[in-house]
Image (tube, rainbow, N blue to C red):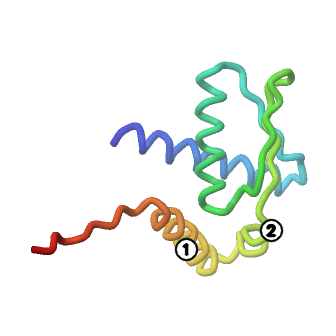
């Protein structure tokens, strides 16, 4: 449980950094320095892809940087809390439905 909380916190931190860079009209490029940091950052990126925030990313091992491309749908509603909540809930529902295991009752 503690690990999932850390992963959620890392994704929230990355989302906050994305919003700050957007506000300052900066490129969405994020550095990493160690294997652990790159893994944590990449897990956060994947979580934000699942939630429909990030569309795609590039990882440059030479310069040790991630470059992000954001989803147009998320960009359009990011400042509208009600629409954003509905959007994120829908993305999470779609994701969980892909991995839901169906069980069938045995027939005598």
Measured as percent of width and height from the top left, residue 61 is found at 80, 24
For the residue pair 27 and 101, the one nearer the viewer reads as 101
* Mark 1 neighbour class, 10 Å CA radius: few under 14, some 14 to 19, many 20 or more: some
Up/down of 84 relative to 21, above or below: below
Measured as percent of width and height from the top left, residue 97 is found at 46, 67
| Helix, strand or loop under label 2 | helix
| Helix, strand or loop under label 1 | helix
Up/down of 63 relative to 46, above or below: above
Measured as percent of width and height from the top left, residue 9 is found at 51, 45
Residue drawn at the location 74% of the way across and 55% of the way down = 19
Residue 54, by quadrant, is: bottom right
Work out which quarter of the rendered image holds the N terminus and state it: top left
Residue identifier under label 1 = 90
* Mark 2 neighbour class, 10 Å CA radius: few under 14, some 14 to 19, many 20 or more: few
Q: Is residue 68 left or right of residue 97?
A: right
Residue 2, by quadrant, is: top left
Q: Which mark is residue 72?
A: 2
Residue drawn at the location 59% of the way across and 33% of the way down = 40
């Amino acid at each position: 449980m503690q690990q999932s909380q850390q992963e959620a916190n890392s994704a929230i931190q990355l989302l906050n950094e994305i919003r700050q860079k957007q506000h300052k009209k900066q490129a969405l490029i994020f550095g990493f320095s160690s294997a652990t940091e790159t893994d944590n950052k990449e897990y956060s990126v994947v979580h934000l892809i699942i939630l429909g925030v990030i569309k795609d990313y590039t990882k440059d091992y030479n310069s040790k940087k991630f470059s992000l491309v954001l989803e147009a749908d998320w960009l359009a509603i990011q400042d509208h809390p009600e629409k954003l909540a509905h959007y994120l809930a829908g993305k999470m529902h779609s994701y969980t439905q892909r991995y839901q295991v169906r069980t069938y009752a045995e027939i005598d």
